[in-house]
Every structure is written in C-alpha cells, then in structure tokens.
C-alpha cells in the first residue's frame, strides 16, 4: 500500500468567408462551410495524381529499384501476438527502437547523374506495412533522402537538412513488409542519418469490413455529400513506435486562414492519449469510392493529405480532442468542408448519422437515432475508468467498427451539425441490429472548453471535471482553478513525456478512489499531499 501511495503522491504533484455564428441565449451553433472542387481537365488531374506518387521521374524510381542494394532484415517480433492483444483496439502497428546508423544500412555508393547514390532495403518480416522514424539532423546541404515503395508504386521526398526535426521524424507508411531508402550526396560521401524506430503494421492498412457498411456515395443528400468532404482517415504515430487508425472531421469556426476556416480537427481523445508525435500525425482526405454501385477505392498513395498538428484541447472523461492542422488543407475531387456544430444537447430519439472509415477502409456512413442523450460508461475489466455524459445511439442502417472511432455524430434534423464524437460501443452485427449501439463524447459539454476557438468573443472555460470524477483534489482540498491548471500543465508537459510519468498517470486514475479514502483517514497523508501538490503546481506554473 505504501508503494502505491508513493506513486500516487509523485503523480499528484503532478468566417469572414460567409461563415456565421449564431447565438440564441446560451446556445451557439454554426453550419458547415463548403468549398467546391477545383475545375480541372481530366488529363491535368491524371498528371497531378502521377506527380503526387512520383516527385522523382518514374523511370528513375524503376532504375534505382533495379540496382543491387544491401538488404536489412529486422528480427521478428517474437511477442507480436501478445503485443497486438494488449494494444488498444484502434492500434494497427507496434514499434521497435533499432537506432541503425547509415553505415550499418548502406554499402558503397553508386554513381547516378553525377552524384553519389546509396540504396538499401529494410524489411520487417510479415508486416502488412512499414513506417520508419529517421533522424536527419546530420544531413548537409545538397544531401537528400528518398523513401520508395518496394514495388515502385510511389516515392516520397526529398527529405533534407531544412526539413529535419530534432528528435526524429516519421516518414510516410508504405504497403508491404519492405521499403527502400535512397540517399543522394553531391560529393559521394555517405550522409549522416539514423533510423530510430520501425513500425510493424500487424493489421492491413485497409482491412476487410462488415458487408452491411454503406458506401458514402449511396447517400443522395447534398448536405451529407458536402459534409463528408471534411471527414478524413486519421493515422496517429505514438512515441513508442506504435500507430493508430481513427476518423476525424474538420470543424467550422469564425477564425480563418488563407480565406477558409482554420483547420481545426475534431476526434476522440483515446485515439491520441499521452505521448503522441503530433508532428507526424497524418490525415488522409477523399478515401472513398466514386460510384454508388461499387468500383475500386482510390490508390492510397494518391490521396491528398495533411501532416503535422498542434494540440489545442482535450478532455479525457469526455473522450474528445481538438487539434489544429499544420499547413493549408488541400482541396480535392469532392471539394473540402468544415462541419457545422451545435452547443445544445441533443434530444432523445433525434435521428443521427456518422461518416467514418471502418477498419481504415474507404468512407462509409451509418444512420440511426439517439437512445440516451446522457449516459455514463464504465471502461476496463474492473470498470475503474468512466466516460461521462456520453450520447448513446443505435444504428438501423450501417454499422461502425474499429477505425470509426472519432467520427462525428451528425444531427440529421439540425442541418447535420456535430453533436458528439464516437468513443466506444458494442460489437456490431449485420443480422441483428438491435444491439448496434455506440456512445459518443458530448460536443455540448466539450464546447465550453474550446468555444473561444470557434466563436468570436467567447471565453474558453475550464475543462469539464464533475465533482464525482477522479479529480478529488478539487473536492477534498479546495484547490483553486489556477492551481489545478498548473497541476494539469505539470501532468501534460512533464509527466506525459516519459513512460514512467504516463504509467503514474494511469495508476492515479485507477487508484484515485482508494487514495481518496486514505487521505480522509490520515492527517499525515493529507499534509504530505498538500506539500507535493504545492511543488507540482509551482513546477507547472513555470512551464
């Protein structure tokens, strides 16, 4: 018990563009904003797609892949099945630190177009896909790294000293268990670089889904088609080397960038969690079938995308998060949209819809109704963690699956405005839909925390933390809002950046009810807790 107490104490220190925001009493709402697709000739579109896949000339790529090169085969993940079984359901890859320097990967240079060219393949046996994290801080001017799909279906780069990130950067994922690295050097010397991590995708980048999923092209409602252009396939890289797949939606706001709403992206917090590499977060747009009767999904290498984001706000108990994407959101073949939203709680029985990427597959949609506008959901084997004020919905058409997490709950009778984000649910069936239930993080409860980013003149409020939540510091010790904010800063900016700190955070939330009883019955523990919270708050205030 003392050991547990010590760990808990350590933690405890722990639009101008015709966008209109409406306010009625304390209700705020905004409709979606839509940009039509660019008008391009078919041959121009084909050329653009080809350039997206081949920033190098395709003949050059094929020539490089035909050359002899060393092959680096990484050891098998001996505990892959166990790792996969222990990982959250939205995980699709596990990571391993390998710290291989260029001299361990490449051999002698080849001469190509007057420059030194170093080639090597890297294989993680049995992987459905591979993603590498590299440290390029040692590159000199003129040196470039290229990443090649092993079959030559795509190439990414060039990565140079100017684009290098301290601590390393994740390269795009490639399909299959092998990938090819190509280094170019003006003077022939081997450039300095390191492969820090390899992510081994133990699930396909696109998995088989239930047959009753409804392709988005089958929905004839114009508003649905427009809003769907703001839904993306979210790939999250974790500092452990793991990768997760979810769904996310662009959110409309009064703030603009480049003549369109700022690229705020709404999803579920469990898709992120602690220790996310936000610089490598990737959102893929327009992964959908054009034909309502079927047809092929687009090549994943041809999709427009955004990479990198900044965390704006999150709430663990509401399972909601808001990030701002780096760079401009590219327009695409279906246009681009920023979804509307409503700060009013939804009504029992309200018809709803979600647009999502089940199993990471092409875009689907589901329709149903709200069966409980406010429900608390216990999670974990022992029910030690609880999501609060969630919105429960049942689906009468379509289903959701892994990868659908984070998708927006759209109110069909309220201009398809967002009312929540998909958090958790039952295992769905195509034959018996009575138990096809999902729970959504409530947007109306999250809104006060993020409203200043969406509404002009609105002041963001403290995160929702009900008196019955794990935050007993507020109830038992009467800490001020400012002190609690500093403790959160200490948790998020210090503890969350280390494996030990993250473990302490998890233990705290699990053991907090017991810890509260200990404090109630011990003056010594209460005094010690007060001292440690003072230290933690001081630390957080300095961040």
Image (cartoon, rainbow, N blue to C red):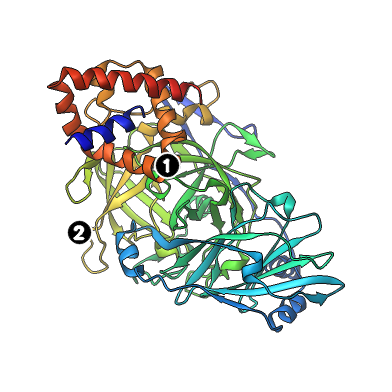
Q: Earlier in the sequence, mark 2 or mark 1?
A: 1
Task: Quickly name the residue at label 2.
Answer: 434
Quarter holding residue 319: top left
Expressed as whole percent of the image width and height from the top left, the position of residue 358 reads 40, 62
Compare residues 440 and 197 and report the one nearer the observer: 197
Compare residues 262 and 22 and report the one nearer the observer: 262
Expressed as whole percent of the image width and height from the top left, the position of residue 75 reads 46, 73
Task: State left or right for residue 35 relative to residue 40.
Answer: left
Quarter holding residue 247: bottom left
Cα–Cα span, label 2 and label 1: 24 Å
Judge whether residue 334 can be spotted in this image: yes
Task: State left or right for residue 362 relative to residue 469.
Answer: right
**Number of marks:** 2
Task: Quickly name the residue at label 1.
Answer: 418
Q: Are marks 2 and 1 in contact (CB under 8 Å)?
A: no
Expressed as whole percent of the image width and height from the top left, the position of residue 281 reads 53, 51
**Residue shown at the point (54%, 20%) measured from the top left:** 457
Helix or strand or loop: what does disc 2 sit on? Answer: helix
Expressed as whole percent of the image width and height from the top left, the position of residue 524 reads 19, 19
């Amino acid at each position: 018990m003392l050991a547990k107490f010590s760990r808990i104490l350590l933690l405890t220190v722990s639009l101008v563009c015709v966008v209109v925001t409406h306010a009625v009493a304390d209700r705020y709402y905004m409709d979606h904003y839509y940009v039509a697709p660019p008008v391009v000739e078919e041959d121009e579109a084909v050329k653009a797609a080809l350039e997206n896949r081949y920033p190098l000339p395709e003949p050059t790529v094929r020539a490089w892949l035909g050359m002899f090169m060393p092959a680096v085969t990484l050891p098998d993940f001996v505990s892959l099945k166990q790792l996969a079984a222990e990982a959250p359901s939205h995980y699709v890859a596990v990571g391993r630190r390998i710290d291989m320097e260029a001299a361990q990967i490449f051999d002698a240079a080849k001469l190509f177009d007057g420059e030194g060219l170093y080639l090597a393949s890297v294989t993680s046996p049995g992987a459905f896909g591979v993603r590498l994290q590299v440290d390029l801080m040692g590159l000199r001017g003129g040196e470039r790294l290229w990443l090649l799909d092993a079959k030559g279906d795509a190439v990414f780069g060039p990565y140079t000293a100017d684009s290098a990130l301290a601590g390393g950067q994740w390269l795009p994922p490639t399909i299959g268990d092998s990938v090819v690295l190509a280094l170019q050097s003006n003077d022939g010397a081997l450039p300095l670089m390191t492969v820090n991590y390899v992510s081994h995708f133990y699930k396909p980048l696109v998995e088989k889904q239930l047959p009753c999923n409804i392709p988005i092209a089958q929905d004839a409602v114009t508003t649905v088609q427009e809003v769907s252009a703001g839904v993306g396939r979210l790939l999250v890289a974790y500092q452990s080397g793991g990768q997760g797949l979810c769904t996310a939606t662009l959110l409309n706001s009064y703030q603009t960038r480049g003549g369109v709403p700022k690229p705020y992206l709404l999803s579920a917090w469990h898709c992120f969690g602690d220790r996310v590499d936000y610089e490598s977060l990737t959102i893929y747009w327009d992964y959908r079938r054009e034909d309502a009767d079927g047809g092929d999904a687009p090549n994943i290498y041809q999709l427009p995308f955004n990479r990198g984001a900044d965390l704006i706000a999150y709430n663990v108990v509401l399972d909601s998060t808001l990030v701002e994407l780096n760079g401009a959101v590219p327009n695409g073949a279906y246009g681009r949209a920023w979804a509307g939203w409503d700060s009013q709680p939804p009504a029992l029985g309200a018809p709803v819809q979600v647009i999502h990427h089940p199993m990471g597959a092409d875009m689907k949609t589901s329709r149903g109704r709200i069966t409980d506008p406010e429900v608390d959901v216990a999670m974990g084997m022992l029910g030690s963690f609880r999501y609060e004020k969630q919105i429960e919905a049942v689906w009468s058409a379509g289903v959701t699956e892994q990868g659908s997490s984070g998708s927006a709950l759209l109110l069909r009778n309220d201009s398809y405005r967002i009312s929540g984000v998909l958090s958790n649910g039952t295992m769905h069936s195509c034959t018996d839909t009575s138990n096809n239930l999902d729970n959504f993080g409530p947007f109306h409860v999250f809104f006060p925390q993020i409203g200043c980013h969406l509404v002009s003149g609105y002041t963001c409020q403290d995160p929702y933390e009900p008196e019955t939540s794990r935050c007993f510091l507020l109830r038992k010790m009467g800490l001020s809002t400012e002190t609690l904010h500093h403790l959160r800063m200490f948790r998020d900016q210090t503890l969350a950046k280390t494996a030990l700190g993250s473990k302490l955070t998890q233990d705290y939330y699990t053991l907090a009810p017991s810890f509260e009883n200990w404090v109630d019955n011990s003056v010594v523990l209460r005094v010690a807790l007060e001292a440690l919270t003072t230290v933690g708050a001081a630390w957080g205030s300095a961040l």
